[in-house]
């Protein structure tokens, strides 16, 4: 094969690879983003079409993941201090169950034209989530912290998560399978919090987070709907933990506290705390929720040319604009990913559709949807080994959240997109345009040399061609097997070899 023909094969072959890659990873995702952020449901407090699509996409995959994790017993061997390997798998199951419950409720009210109810077509996944939550092997990390009495000794985060997930499970399937366990956890955790000096207990030894205590209180009360128990009196007494002097200097729930004295050990509130708490507060303390939301907006809502949303730390905190936090994620310009992801549901539950809409379009734009259904943004922020679907199940739950009945609604006043949406459009469509121009330039340059009777001479051309064919073949096989991202990385290698080029007369 002549060198000219060899170079042509690689040149035009690379152009095809680049076109396919930009279509798959940029152009089609850009079209999907524009379509999804144009859904009128986002402005009206209804469940958008993206939530229904994402639920159907995740349902078989999450069932397979949950069943495989249980069968592998991998949870018994993870580092008990590794948050992603211990907490995230169970949180993902709870997010999925919450979202399915929201969608089922909407389906029963005629909020979806799909023929089959979510609780029906997702039954296998719901059952897998229940098994994952109740599997003792998945509890290995808290057993390391608390010993064999971990189900009845502090351990607020884990026990409350169990309550939240199993209550949602029973509401969806009504099998009664986990009711004894659920009733035991509701009663014993409520009694232990009731008996504590200041209404707070530890999540882990030496770590007491009021955010988790509030969630536990709210989820215990919510579980009463399926257990038949009545913890209303407990909730009324438990609110003592969220009154002065246990709030921070601006009247919001602090980050950490001492369960012995009740005093805040890390006093300042945070974005993730308020976004999480305010998602559930309207159900248990509506008056407090209104005041907390007002303060949250006053001290944490931030508007810049490129984005609008919740900060992770107070606006007057000078050292919180650019950092990474395991709970909040990468904080850029003060905006916290977790605070804004959870903040959508908080805005919806408090009737702030104006803020919910702004958050939704920015979250969807950053989700990077691929043609196969994957949301690459949330997937990259998840733990690929232990909790690959955490980000997507969390987003699913957020998008399936709607305002409570009778809520005071503040609708978006006018059409408005933050600057980040235009940056996203530039990303999805601008890069392909630059790539196309570059590719056409290279092809035109080669054609000009060839027409002039000059032949580009590549050093090591035979070696490059063999490597090119090898990477191309392996990449296509990997992508055909369903590993789109891995195949794309291998295919990208066809573009990597660089050789000296000089035009010479034949």
Image (tube, grey):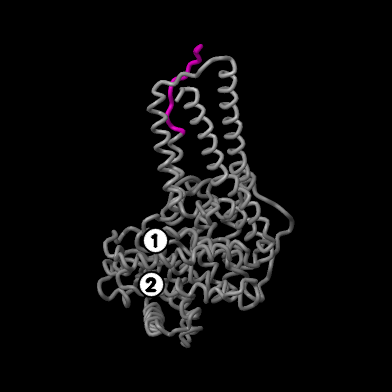
Q: Quadrant of residue 497?
A: top left
Position of 124 with respect to 298 (left or right) is left
Count residues near mark 1 (Cα–Cα under 10 Å), then give few for <14, some for 14-19, many for 20+.
some
Please state which of the two labelled residues, at mark 1 or mark 2, is closer to the viewer.
Answer: 2
Residue closest to the far front: 1
Position of 420 with respect to 205 (left or right) is right
- Front in this rendered view, residue 359 or 154: 359
How far from the left and from the top, in percent, is residue 24? Answer: 55, 46
The quarter of the rendered structure image containing the N terminus is: top left
Question: Label 1, on which residue?
Answer: 265
**Residue occupying image coordinates x 65% and y 64%:** 352
Which residues, given as a range, are shown in magenta? Answer: 495-506
Q: Is residue 496 magenta?
A: yes
Position of 9 with respect to 149 (left or right) is right
Relative to 245, residue 220 above or below: below
Instruction: Tell me which numbered mark, 1 or 2, is placed earlier along the sequence.
Output: 2
Relative to 365, residue 278 above or below: below
Question: Label 2, on which residue?
Answer: 133
Say if residue 100 shows up in the picture.
yes
**Residue occupying image coordinates x 44% and y 61%:** 255
How far from the left and from the top, in percent, is residue 307? Answer: 61, 48
């Amino acid at each position: 094969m002549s060198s000219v023909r060899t170079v042509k094969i690689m040149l035009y072959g690379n152009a095809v690879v680049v076109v396919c890659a930009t279509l798959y990873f940029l152009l089609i995702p850009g079209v999907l983003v524009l379509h999804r952020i144009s859904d009128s449901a986002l402005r009206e407090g209804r469940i958008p079409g993206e939530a229904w699509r994402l639920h159907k996409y995740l349902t078989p995959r999450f069932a397979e993941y949950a069943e495989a994790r249980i069968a592998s017993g991998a949870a018994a061997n993870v580092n008990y201090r590794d948050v992603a390997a211990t907490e995230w798998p169970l949180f993902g199951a709870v997010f999925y169950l919450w979202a399915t419950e929201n969608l089922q409720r909407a389906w029963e009210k005629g909020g979806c034209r799909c023929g089959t109810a979510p609780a029906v077509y997702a039954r296998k996944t719901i059952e897998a989530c229940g098994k994952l939550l109740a599997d003792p092997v998945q509890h290995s990390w808290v057993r390391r912290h608390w010993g064999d009495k971990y189900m009845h000794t502090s351990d607020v985060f884990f026990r409350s998560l169990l309550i939240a997930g199993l209550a949602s499970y029973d509401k969806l399937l009504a099998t009664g399978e986990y009711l004894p366990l659920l009733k035991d956890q509701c009663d014993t955790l409520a009694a232990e919090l009731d008996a504590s000096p200041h209404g707070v207990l530890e999540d882990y030894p030496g770590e007491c987070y009021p955010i988790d205590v509030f969630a536990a209180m709210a989820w215990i009360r919510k579980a009463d709907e399926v257990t038949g128990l009545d913890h209303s009196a407990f909730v009324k007494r438990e609110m003592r933990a969220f009154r002065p002097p246990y709030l921070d200097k601006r009247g919001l729930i602090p980050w950490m506290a001492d369960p012995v004295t009740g005093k805040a050990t890390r006093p300042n509130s945070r974005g993730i705390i308020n976004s999480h708490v305010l998602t559930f507060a309207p159900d248990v303390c509506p008056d407090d929720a209104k005041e907390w939301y007002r303060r949250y907006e006053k001290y944490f809502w931030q508007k810049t040319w490129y984005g609008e949303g919740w900060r992770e730390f107070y606006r007057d905190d000078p050292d919180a604009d650019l950092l990474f936090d395991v709970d909040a994620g990468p904080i850029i310009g003060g905006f916290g990913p977790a605070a804004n992801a959870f903040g959508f549901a908080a805005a919806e539950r408090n009737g702030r559709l104006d803020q919910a809409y702004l958050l939704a379009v920015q979250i969807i734009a950053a989700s990077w949807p691929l043609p196969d259904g994957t949301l690459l943004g949330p997937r990259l922020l998840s733990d690929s080994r232990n909790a690959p679907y955490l980000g997507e199940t969390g987003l699913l739950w957020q998008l399936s959240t709607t305002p409570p009945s009778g809520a005071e609604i503040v609708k978006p006043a006018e059409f408005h997109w933050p600057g980040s949406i235009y940056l996203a459009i530039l990303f999805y469509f601008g890069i392909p345009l630059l790539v196309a121009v570059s590719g056409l330039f290279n092809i035109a340059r080669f054609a000009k040399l060839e027409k002039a009777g000059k032949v580009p001479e590549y050093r090591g051309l035979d070696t490059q061609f063999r490597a090119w064919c090898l990477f191309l073949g392996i990449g296509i096989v990997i992508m055909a097997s369903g590993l789109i991202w891995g195949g794309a990385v291998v295919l990208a290698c066809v573009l990597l070899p660089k050789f000296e080029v000089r035009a010479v007369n034949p």
